[in-house]
Image (cartoon, coloured by chain):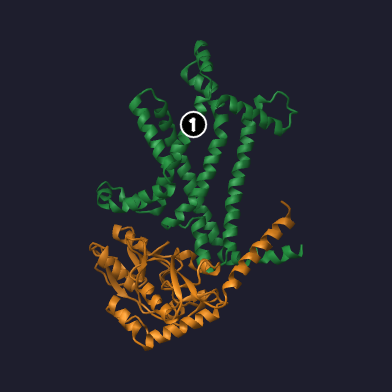
Chain colours: A orange, B green
């Protein structure tokens, strides 16, 4: 194959991609929502194979308010942003914190929740000292491509940082003793300890959010050109706050307030 | 040409290498270590497995066949998870045997799983190569009064090696490509580092660099093997003037005849 042919094919492929997204850009009726469903209680797959959790219920409320038909898709965390940009779905609703690096690639909605990060360790480890000096040389696991990974790389340079595709896996490795500590979302961590930990582990402490790393909180992410869709969801988020449906749903799932407002 | 110039900066973002190039290098070192060590261990394991498989003892040959069937018949990722997460589940037993320190490290888990896997494939390559040497030759050597070692050294091995060189090389290439799986169990090999950089930058050209590095590795091995094969098969070429292409044909015919 000569280079002209290759270029022609690349051009054709680019045209197809561009064509596919421009067809959908107007008049939203159905919206496909992508999430990494390995993040209970926010999103996980139940034994029947359905995606369930707080964010599923919350986005069903938002979609009802916006009169949209919404479907949910499971997608590995590392691939959520590329898949959104490739039009595999239209919205990311996956506890994605709004950060400057991500905002260069995607358009974020207003923040709809903010949960604290937390550090957990084995039940046998009684020390509550989590200063970088105390954790020097210890292994700390977390999910890759997350604010937690960025936080560890910035503040725990002398610890051995291990990155996993999902948050379930470092939790497993903490339970088996392969890791000394795990960093993750406080609510997800507590959920694991309560449901699957078998007394293996304990949450040492929650960590104060650092704005330049953790950002203001969690938002939905859209392709940069879908400003109209982002506006629809921002309106729905505000409505769900105003009529108390967020608080009602929040109380069903959590003991603490996660709205972050 | 103008179109090419427009595409080029899109595909190759060189500033990425300034900042993250060292990550690719450190990942490459891990990849080479894991592949090198596990293939070498696999080779050492493969010989006894191959002998067991060819043994006239039924139990021994069935056990070896079971081993080979399991490791060739299940996905390597599944085997890696079995070792990595399986070891985590039986930690108390491993600790009491003093093996936990080994299985605690993702690096050793990967080498362990890869060595077991490649041993199964390599033992089959050895078996096929040894079987390709006609029995009559061995009988003839015996009739000449050659010792067991002399038969192996001068009759069987030189011919078997020629048959086995290419499959061994292919297996090495397979393991290099499969080693990308280690990134899933936290090892920052070439693929792991690439994913790390991608998570930071969302710039897909890093995957392009990664692919190029893998390609250079596999292509180098392929060429080195070609050279080794030509060297081993030099006696088969009657006329030194015969071009390389024809030598390849001769060799292919030889392989068909012996396989």
Depth order, front residue of A231/B177: A231
Residue B170 coordinates in the image, percent (x, y): 55, 40
Which quadrant of the figure has residue B106?
bottom left
Residue shown at 30% from the left, 66% from the top: A192
- Image quarter hosting the N terminus of chain B: bottom right
Residue B11 coordinates in the image, percent (x, y): 64, 63
Residue shown at 49% from the left, 53% from the top: B180
Q: What residue did someone put label 1 on?
A: B126
- Image quarter hosting the C terminus of chain B: top right
Q: Is residue B107 above or below residue A85?
A: above
Residue shown at 58% from the left, 55% from the top: B211
Residue B111 in view: yes
Q: Is residue A229 above or below residue B65?
A: below
Depth order, front residue of A37/A24: A24
Specify few, some or many for label 1: CA neighbours under 10 Å numbering under 14, 14-19, or 20 or more: many
Extreme residue in the bottom direction: A242
Residue shown at 50% from the left, 45% from the top: B175
Residue B233 coordinates in the image, percent (x, y): 63, 28
Depth order, front residue of A242/A119: A242
Q: Secondary structure at mark 1?
A: helix
Residue A167 coordinates in the image, percent (x, y): 38, 65
Dot 1: chain letter: B
Residue B233 in view: no
Which quadrant of the figure has residue B19?
bottom right
Which quadrant of the figure has residue A240?
bottom left
């Amino acid at each position: 194959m000569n280079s002209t042919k290759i270029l022609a094919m690349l051009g054709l492929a680019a045209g197809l991609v561009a064509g596919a997204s421009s067809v959908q850009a107007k008049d939203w009726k159905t919206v496909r929502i992508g999430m990494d469903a390995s993040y209970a209680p926010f999103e996980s797959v139940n034994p029947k194979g359905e995606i369930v959790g707080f964010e599923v219920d919350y986005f069903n409320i938002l979609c009802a308010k916006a009169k949209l038909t919404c479907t949910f898709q499971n997608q590995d965390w590392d691939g959520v942003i590329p898949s959104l940009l490739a039009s595999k779905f239209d919205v990311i609703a996956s506890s994605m914190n709004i950060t400057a690096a991500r905002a260069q690639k995607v358009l974020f909605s207003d923040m709809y929740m903010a949960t604290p990060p937390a550090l957990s360790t084995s039940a046998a480890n009684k020390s509550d000292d989590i200063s970088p000096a105390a954790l020097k040389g210890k292994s700390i696991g977390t999910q890759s491509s997350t604010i937690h990974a960025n936080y560890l790389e910035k503040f725990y340079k002398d610890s051995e940082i291990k990155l996993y595709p999902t948050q379930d896996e470092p939790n497993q490795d903490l339970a088996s003793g392969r890791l000394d500590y795990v960093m993750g979302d406080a609510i997800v961590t507590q959920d694991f300890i309560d449901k699957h930990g078998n007394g293996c582990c304990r949450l040492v402490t929650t960590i104060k959010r650092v704005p330049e790393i953790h950002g203001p909180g969690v938002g939905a992410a859209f392709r940069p050109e879908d400003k109209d869709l982002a506006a629809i969801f921002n309106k729905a988020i505000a409505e769900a706050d105003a009529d108390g449906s967020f608080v009602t749903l929040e109380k069903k799932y959590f003991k603490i307030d996660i709205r972050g407002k | 040409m103008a179109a090419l110039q427009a595409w080029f900066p899109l595909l190759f973002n060189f500033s990425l290498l300034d900042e993250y190039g060292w990550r690719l290098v450190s990942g490459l070192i891990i990849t080479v270590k894991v592949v090198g060590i596990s293939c070498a261990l696999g080779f050492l394991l493969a010989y006894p497995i191959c002998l067991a498989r060819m043994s006239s003892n039924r139990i021994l040959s069935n056990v070896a066949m079971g081993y080979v069937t399991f490791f060739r018949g299940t996905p390597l990722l599944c085997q890696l998870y079995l070792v990595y997460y399986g070891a985590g589940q039986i930690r108390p037993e491993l600790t009491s045997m003093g093996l936990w320190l080994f299985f605690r490290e993702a690096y050793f888990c990967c080498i362990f799983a890869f060595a077991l896997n490649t041993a199964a494939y390599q033992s089959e390559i050895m078996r096929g190569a040894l079987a390709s040497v006609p029995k009559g030759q061995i009988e003839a050597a015996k009739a000449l009064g050659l010792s067991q070692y002399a038969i192996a050294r001068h009759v069987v091995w030189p011919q078997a090696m020629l048959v086995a060189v290419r499959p061994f090389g292919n297996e090495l290439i397979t393991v290099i490509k499969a080693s990308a799986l280690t990134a899933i169990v936290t090892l920052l090999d070439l693929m792991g580092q690439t994913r790390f950089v991608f998570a930071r930058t969302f710039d897909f050209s890093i995957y392009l660099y990664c692919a190029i590095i893998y390609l250079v590795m596999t292509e180098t091995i392929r060429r080195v093997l070609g050279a080794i094969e030509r060297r081993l098969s030099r006696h088969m070429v009657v006329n030194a003037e015969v071009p390389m292409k024809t030598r390849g044909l001769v060799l292919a015919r030889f392989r068909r005849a012996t396989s």
